[in-house]
Every structure is written in C-alpha cells, then in structure tokens.
Image: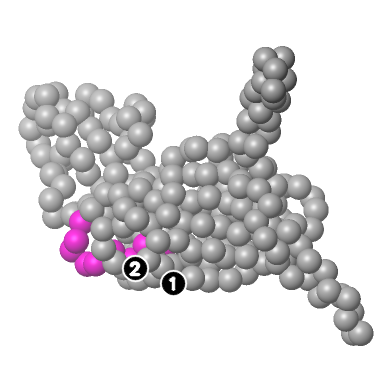
Amino acid sequence: MNRKNIITMSLVAFLALPAMAQTDNTFVFTDAQGNELADGDTVVASVYDATNKQIKVPLGIKNISGKKTAGSLTVDLKNMPNGSFTTCAFGSCSANPAQSVACLDATGNYSEPDLNSEWKPAEGSYATWTATLQLQKRAVKTLKMPWGDIDQTGDVEALGRKVYVKFVYADPAGINDIRRNSSDSKVVARYNLNGQRVSSAQQGINVVRLQNGKVIKYLQR
C-alpha cells in the first residue's frame, strides 16, 4: 500500500469518528417544568419522602421525533451505597437491579414524560452518590398477523442523551439550626448543591455562609 492510500484511508477514518459518536436526540429527558435537558446535564434529587421512605428522580422522558419509535433506558447504579432502586420507563419496570435497568416499548408515541424512578435508601444510612441515566433508540419490528400488525422492540440502533442524577440523603438531625437569635448567624450568601448562588432557599439541600464565616448545609422541604 502506498503512502497516498494510507493518508486517504486515515482521513476517511478520521472524518467518520464524529458521525459514530453523535448523540441521538429522538428521546430527551425533561425536568419538572417540562424543559429539555442537554446531554451531560446533572440534576439533584434530595427531597426525601418520609412516608414512602424514598427519593424520587425529578425527571421525565419525551419523544420529540414525532415518529413511532422504540426506546430503552439504562441506569448505572454501580455507585449506589445501599437500599434499592426502582425504575419504570417505556412501558416496563425493573426493581433493584445490580448494575442497570433496560425498559423498552414499541409504541414510542410519548407526548408526556414517561419516567417513574426512585431510590429507597436504607433508613438512617445517609449518603450522597450519583447515578447515570442514558436513553437508547431501538428498532421497531412489525409482524404481519392474520388479526393485524404487531409491533415488537428490536435491537439498539443509537445511544441517546445521558444525564447524571446526584442523590443526597441527609440527616435532618445533623443539620444545624441557623435560625438562632444571634448576630453572628446572619446569612451572607446562599448556594445550591451545584455551587450556584441563589437569592432564596431552594427545595432540597441548601448551602449557606454565615457572617461568622461558618458554612452550613440544611434541608429545605
């Protein structure tokens, strides 16, 4: 093989890399307000439901392609410190998986968020960890039957958007009371868990810096 052919083949391989790595946008994650999340976004799940003893994932799934498309969802739980995890998406559910879940359905006509997922931590085992959720586009196989067509979900065709969910299970008894009647407990700055400065208390974990220099976390329900 001559030098010209080697250079040409190398150029073709280089140009093909972006196409292979491109993220499929058939399905998207949405937040509680219905806004789309970008690939690689991080959301915080910190609201502990004391009745059901769980922390829900504040996300939905939406098909924005306008086409009949099958999909699936994988959840990487290798960092889960304790408890159990349940996910329902794309018409099926998976409970307490060791590493990941795959939920899929062949109808694909999702105009509303279709994700119900929660972590049930071991009570009192406080922890912070991150799960990785990734969407997948799957093929749809149509079977011709005497009574009509039947759709079946096929193989994964492309990887979709990925988001990171940071779970925060904090000890309410360990959170300092910053409402003491003392001049040195005045709040001079307030932040969310992403390090962004906020003007008022947000639902979940808040981080505040006091006039005396102390930095305190507390839970806002």
Q: Position of residue 207 (x, y in %)?
A: 25, 36
Q: In the displayed structure, would residue 146 be above or below residue 198?
A: below
Task: Specify whether residue 199 is in view.
Answer: no
Residue closest to the eye, 74 or 63: 74
Instruction: Name the residue rendered at 44%, 49% in the picture.
Output: 132
Q: Position of residue 144 (x, y in %)?
A: 88, 76
Residue closest to the eye, 154 or 88: 154
Q: Position of residue 21 (x, y in %)?
A: 61, 36
From the image, tell me which residue sits under label 2: 84
Quadrant (top left, top right, bottom left, bottom right) of the N terminus: top right
Residue farthest to the right? Answer: 146
Q: In the displayed structure, would residue 198 be above or below residue 119?
A: above
Image side of residue 203 versus residue 189, left or right? right
Query: Which stretch did the figure color magenta?
Result: 118-126
Residue 85: image tag? none
Indicate the secondary structure of the residue bearing disc 2. Answer: strand
Residue farthest to the front? Answer: 1
Residue closest to the eye, 86 or 36: 86
Mark 2–mark 1 CB contact (< 8 Å): yes
Instruction: Name the residue rendered at 23%, 53% in the picture.
Output: 127
Q: Going from the N terminus, do you reach mark 2 or mark 1 first?
A: 2
Residue 213 magenta: no
Q: Position of residue 158 (x, y in %)?
A: 66, 48
Which amino acid type is marked by label 1? Ala
Instruction: Name the residue rendered at 51%, 57% in the picture.
Output: 74
Residue closest to the eye, 175 or 93: 93
Decide: few, some or many residues near mark 1? Use Cα within 10 Å; few <14, some 14-19, many ≥20.
some
Instruction: Name the residue rendered at 40%, 61% in the picture.
Output: 99
Which amino acid type is marked by label 2? Ser
| Quadrant of res 177 | top left
Indicate the secondary structure of the residue bearing disc 1. Answer: strand
From the image, tell me which residue sits under label 1: 95
